[in-house]
Amino acid sequence: PESLRRDVVVVGAGPAGLMAARRLYEAGQSVAVLEARDRVGGRTWSAEVDGAFLELGGQWVSPDQTELLGLLDELGKETYPRYRDGASVYISPAAGERHVYEGESFPVTESTAAEIDRLTELLDELAAEIGAEQPWAHPRARELDTVSFQDWLRSHCDDELACRSVGIFIAGGMLTKPAHSFSALQAVLMAASAGSFTNLTDEDFILDRRVIGGMQSVSQALAAELPEDTVILNSPVRTISTEPEGGVTVWSDNATVHAEQAVIAVPPNLYSRITFEPPLPRLQHQMHQHQSMGLVIKVHAVYDRPFWREKGLSGTGFGPDELCQEVYDNTNYGDERGTLVAFVSDEKADAVFALRESERRRKILESLANYLGAEALTPEVYYESDFGSEEWTRGAYAASYDLGGLHRYGAHQLEPVGPLHWACSDLASAGYQHVDGALRQGRRAAEEILDKTT
Ligand code: FAD
């Protein structure tokens, strides 16, 4: 491997690492970015599959994601809104009844609707009061971090359907973990990071727009702005040595980089794939074992036309007990074909991953047909994004703490260790788990280094 000397070495060429590299380069620092994969973009990945353009990873932009929106502007990238005309479909749990409805509220009984509104208000209040910056510092942090979101909902509401309908927006919908496995505080962080819990339940807000050309093109554009050969692909970082007299040496498959500072821009569940010499402090060792990735299958199904629109349907569907908990129209900009995207989350994903591929596909398409009709059974192109089996991610969408981890460790998660600085969407406050949060963390880590060195 070649040996390089740079001011800063960045590990990981996802949105966070590339944003850090951009900011450092702008400030006059020399930079190398080491990337394990043969491409940039990390959990954003826009690809052609069997002739169809698909967003295999992160894709949606919401109005509060101002760091991402600002960058899109600077890069001259345009966005377009998700198709949303027409009625939505709700499949009620247990009974499995299909309801076609207009407006924002699920078609449930008046008393369940009132309970959903009450829980939503409670979560909005907590999110506003606790915020996303330092949820661990709030006086109620320990109380809320030591009860599961599942139990918290049920201790505030006797209506099981209301609990489930609220729970899915954070459990299956965002953290992609069962609601019994993370805390109420972790749920509040998720809500606060998107502005409010109401924002998370409003698909017209949180899934507002897409990038023309694909979300990965943002990372590609960031990489293209850096001097040639800054980003070194196919180069997993194996060992990071920090020198007692200052400085850091990063050993990867294609290059060894000697630098003053490093940005580790990989998700926390992967830190232990790297050998640190000397080892990281005990607190880091412990903390990193309490952060884990969720699991979700992002399903893509492409049809000769968006047939659901002919029936007055938007393509949006929710079903707490359905295999695909959510489905949306994901038709590409200017495309005649119609694309649906759907999500199979956590324990439901476990169950279908135990099946043969053909059986899994059949069950998933049957779930799409439950929402939108039998035409859904026969797509022209079908693909399942499975970041859980990707060596350099190991889950989706992002990492979160297990029960009690957020208030126990959160205050320390961004503390630099000597010359090592941390950046990824999994450690974000605003934009937590999203591309926007990754960019914010990349910028923050770069500023932290610039504050030290200039
Ligand atoms: P990553 O994108 O994971 O980048 C980390 C990089 O580090 C990767 O390229 C990886 O290969 C590399 N790496 C790891 N280990 C090493 C090593 N040892 N050496 C060198 N390189 C290494 N967000 C949204 O905003 N909107 C969405 O609609 C959305 N949907 C999503 C759907 C899916 C299926 C997934 C998976 C994610 C989605 N997200 C979405 C989340 C978003 O994609 C991520 O939050 C974002 O990409 C995180 O950026 P990052 O730079 O922090 O990490």
Image (tube, grey):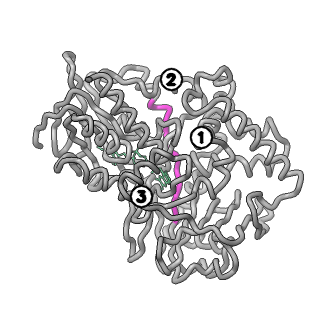
Q: Quadrant of the N terminus?
A: top left
**Residue 191 as seen in the image, left or right of residue 32:** right
Q: Is residue 43 magenta?
A: no
Label 3 to label 2: alpha-carbon separation: 31 Å
Q: Nearer the viewer, residue 121 or 141?
A: 121
Q: Is residue 411 above or below residue 152?
A: above
Q: Position of residue 186 (x, y in %)?
A: 60, 35
Q: Is the shortest distance between ligand 1 and the CB of mark 3 under 8 Å? A: yes
Q: Give the residue at x 66% y 20%.
A: 139
Q: Which residue is mark 2?
A: 411
Dot 3, how many residues are within 10 Å of its Cα: few (below 14), some (14-19), or many (20+)? many
Side of 165 where 296 appears, left or right: left
Q: Which residues are magenta?
A: 288-299
* 390 relative to 396 in the view: left or right: left
Q: Which residue is mark 1?
A: 190
Where in the figure is residue 393, as x and y percent of width and height? 40, 48
In this view, the residue in front, 379 or 169, is 169
Residue 343 rendering spot, x and y as whole percentages: 57, 60
- Mark 3 vs mark 2: give the one in front: 3
Q: Secondary structure at mark 1?
A: helix
On the question of residue 296 being in view, the answer is yes
Q: Nearer the viewer, mark 1 or mark 3?
A: 3
Q: Which mark is residue 215?
A: 3
Residue occupying image coordinates x 53% and y 77%: 338
